[in-house]
């Protein structure tokens, strides 16, 4: 009987070990001279148990387990095999292999790397024309293995990121890369996380800037004078009155808009849909908008296969409209901010707005939109007016009593 965690061992020790493959460690009995047994797999005689490890140098392949108990030797063999696997993985796993395993781990659908979150795929595997991913950077610098990626290498790569410094993208994507290396350490692909040595990224907050009514009118007027004016005008109004981000709006499915003009936004944890009521005239505009794809209002997958290219197409044209209207700062997110601020100033609750925007925590909503809640301050002023009116008589009595107590008596005057 030979113990082995896996019957396969790599022919080339420099090749990475796949998941589930471990180096073979075989225990055997080394019988004493007085023992009448000769078979090495016989272990009931109490003779010493030794190990045979073909992964070690020839002179070190056979060594004592330090015990005569077969079951104890099996446990030691399992522990040493696990340690050997960790050392082998740390030394030989490639960046490409590690990235693919991590993306599979992050995917929530079908457990495939292509279904991982976009930000993970963008920074670790895909990248873009201007922004190189970690995998492409390592290939360019001839760093095929994960343990070759040092803190200085990551710092050089991060300094070349083609991201706006005033946006939160730098901070978000830095967290994505740090999470990848933390996963590699947790699964014994690396000994330490090199991202821990890098300085933290501090981003200056950009205040939320909704569009003024006059600015929105100017924006729509400039959109009407552009090519694809109907498409752009419809998308702008949809984002303004639904609070959708540009990717969600431009890739919106037709079945999300119900007959009663309620737009299904997203599911809650309870499985129920969150709806936003759309104005009748705004809801009719996407319905009447013609698109070559029957399932979407704006998106044609044959022309622009991914949501990123679709939103990029709209975002580029929307920035041109901002330039024509001479409105600054530019950005589709200002339409989402306009929806949020107008909802709050009309008496909406911050908790309801967080649900409409899809924020998992109301702290995010309060951080960005609480300074714009004028109705909240108005309610506080009204509450204070009512409180002051009720306490007015009591206040006057207290002032009168205090004045009377403060008057000196006749005896006090004689002493003076």
Image (spheres, rainbow, N blue to C red):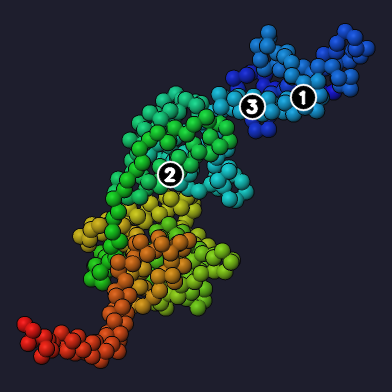
Q: Nearer the viewer, residue 119 or 79?
A: 79
Q: Which mark is residue 73?
A: 1
Counting residues from the start of the chain, the first of labels 1 and 2 encountered is 1
From the top left corner, tell me how far across and down residue 376 is, in percent. Answer: 32, 75
Say if 315 sits above or below 134 in the image: below
The secondary element bearing badge 2 is classed as: helix
Q: Is there any visible trace of residue 16 in the rendered image?
A: no
Q: How many marks?
A: 3
Q: Nearer the viewer, residue 355 or 410?
A: 410
Dot in front, 1 or 3: 1
- State the residue at coordinates (43%, 28%): 150
Badge 1: how crowded within 10 Å, few (<14), some, or many (20+)?
A: many
Q: Which residue is mark 2?
A: 175
Q: Nearer the viewer, residue 11 or 253?
A: 11
From the top left corner, tell me how far across and down residue 248 is, in percent. Answer: 45, 60
| Figure quadrant of residue 273 | bottom right
Q: Which residue is mark 3?
A: 83
């Amino acid at each position: 009987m030979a113990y082995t965690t896996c019957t396969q061992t790599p022919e080339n020790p420099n090749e990475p070990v796949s998941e589930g493959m471990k180096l073979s460690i075989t225990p055997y009995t080394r019988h004493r001279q007085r023992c009448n047994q000769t078979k090495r797999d016989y272990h009931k005689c109490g003779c010493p148990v030794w190990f045979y490890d073909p992964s070690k140098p020839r002179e070190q392949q056979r060594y004592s387990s330090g015990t005569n108990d077969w079951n104890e030797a099996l446990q030691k063999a399992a522990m040493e095999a696990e340690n050997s696997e960790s050392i082998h993985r740390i030394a030989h796993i490639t960046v490409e292999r590690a990235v693919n395993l991590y993306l599979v781990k992050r995917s929530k659908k079908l457990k495939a790397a292509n279904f991982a979150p976009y930000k993970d795929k963008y920074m670790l595997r895909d990248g873009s024309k201007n922004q190189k991913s970690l995998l492409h950077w390592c290939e360019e610098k001839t760093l095929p293995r994960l343990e070759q990626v040092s803190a200085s290498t990551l710092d050089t790569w991060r300094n070349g990121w083609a991201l706006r410094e005033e946006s939160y993208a730098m901070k978000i994507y830095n967290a994505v890369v740090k999470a990848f290396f933390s996963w590699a350490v947790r699964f014994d692909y690396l000994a330490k996380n090199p991202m821990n040595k890098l300085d933290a990224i501090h981003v200056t907050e950009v205040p939320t800037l909704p569009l003024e009514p006059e600015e929105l009118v100017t924006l729509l007027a400039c959109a009407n004078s552009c090519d694809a004016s109907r498409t752009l005008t419809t998308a702008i109004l949809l984002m303004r009155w639904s609070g959708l981000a540009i990717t969600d709006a431009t890739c919106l499915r037709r079945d999300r808009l119900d007959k009663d003009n309620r737009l299904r936004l997203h599911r809650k944890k309870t499985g129920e849909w969150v709806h936003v009521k759309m104005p009748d005239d705004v809801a009719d505009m996407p319905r009447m908008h013609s698109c070559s794809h029957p399932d979407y209002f704006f998106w044609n997958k044959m022309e622009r296969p991914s949501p990123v290219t679709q939103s990029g197409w709209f975002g580029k044209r929307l920035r041109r409209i901002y330039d024509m209207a001479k409105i600054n700062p530019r950005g589709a997110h200002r339409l989402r901010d306009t929806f949020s601020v107008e909802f709050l100033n009309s008496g909406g609750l911050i908790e309801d707005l967080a649900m409409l925007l899809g924020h998992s925590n109301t702290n995010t909503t309060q951080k960005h939109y609480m300074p714009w809640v004028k109705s909240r301050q108005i309610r506080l002023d009204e509450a204070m007016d009512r409180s002051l009116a009720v306490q007015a008589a009591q206040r006057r009595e207290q002032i009168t009593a205090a004045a009377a107590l403060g008057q000196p008596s006749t005896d006090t005057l004689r002493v003076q």
